[in-house]
Image: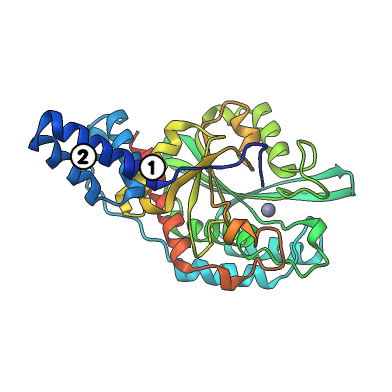
Amino acid sequence: MRRLATELEVRKALPRVRLCSLWLKGLLYLLGMLTLVSCSRGTDAQPKALFPSQIKTALSPPEAVASDNAPLPHIDAKRAFEYTREVTAFGPRYMGNENHKKLERYILDHLKGDQVEEDDFTADTVEGKFPVRNIIAKFPGTKDGIIVIMGHYDTNYPLRNIGYVGANDGGSSTAVLLEFANQLRVAPGKKRDGYSVWLVWTDGEEAVKTWSDTDSLYGTRHLAEKWEKDGTLKKIKALMVMDMIGDADLNIDRNTNGSPWLLDLIYAAAERLGYQSHFYDRQGPIADDHLPFFKRGVPSADVIDLDYGYNNVFHHTAQDTMDKLSPESLQIAGDTIMETIRMLDQR
Ligand SMILES: [Zn+2]
């Protein structure tokens, strides 16, 4: 994926704190002790969470969170971390190479007994023709409609000779979706209680030369077109992409290329789990696998941390290795999306 022309806007906590203290002083003078009580309640909270929470409280219907006592999800993050290690150990996994084929078999082996579909085609690129394969696992639900979760499993063709293994970029997304499959599986012949959930391991997300509209997102551009023709797009209630979510220093960006209500719902899910300090410190537009669907009107969100190492220094380098990741980050991102699915099921 790639950042668009605009840099991510950092929403620093400091000016907010300063604003609050100015506001406090002014209002203290005018309104007295009552105001002091309400603001000091705010400053006791984490500065990062303070501002978004206040906005959200103002916008959300009060019944959305208050009456919901459902148990919180908890994925097996250690297992997901082991998957990441195994996926990364295959080495460079660009479209069609031997390691990519091994990984396809590895994913399919994990989905034995599940309803699996493959979307295969040949991409004609500036570097020649490549076989592309999206892998789709379907978990049918009792409700009419589909929630789609995507994550890419390919690594970059241009980085094939530098020892690039994409632990975070490609590895973590592949692994967390495998763990979602474990969580979504129900007894044979039964349906999950809620919408159908489709997990999609996307291929050809990365550019083969230089990122552009035509050199990127090969798998999802193909799938969006296919789903537009066969009517699937109309049934999708929400589509969420997971990308680079293993970074030990996890800060999920609010990717403004997305549906605001879905971005807010993800935040509400994170808040229920107490993970909100890992979300939305920065915001800006990022191009990723959700775009071909978002452009066609599908409610979409991209769950991504595009600040991988100081100033994103590990991104698309040989330093994207397992030692930069943590099971805790997979826990945070994974639980949050499982909770978002549950909250979507309630709607
Ligand atoms: Zn990438």
Label 2 SS: helix
Whether residue 209 is visible, yes or no, is yes
Q: Earlier in the sequence, mark 1 or mark 2?
A: 1
Give the spatial CA distance, label 1 vs label 2.
30 Å
Give residue 51's position: percent from left, percent from top.
33, 40
Amino acid marked by disc 2: Ala
Asked if marks 1 and 2 touch (Cβ < 8 Å), the reply is no
In which quadrant of the rendered view does residue 15 lie? top left
Give residue 241's position: percent from left, percent from top.
56, 45
Q: Nearer the viewer, residue 86 or 322?
A: 322
165 to 33, vertically: above or below? below
Q: Which residue is mark 1?
A: 15
In which quadrant of the rendered view does residue 262 lie? top left
Image side of residue 206 versus residue 9, left or right = right
Q: Which residue is mark 2?
A: 66
Quarter that holds the C terminus: top left
Amino acid marked by disc 1: Pro
Q: Nearer the viewer, residue 18 or 6?
A: 18
Whether residue 108 is visible, yes or no, is no
Residue at left offset 83%, top offset 67%: 161
Residue at left offset 75%, top offset 65%: 92
Q: Is mark 1 within 8 Å of ligand 1?
A: no
Give residue 183's position: percent from left, percent from top.
43, 58
Give residue 124's position: percent from left, percent from top.
87, 42
Instruction: For label 1, count other residues whose C-alpha is less than 10 Å away and answer few (under 14), some (14-19) or many (20+).
Output: few
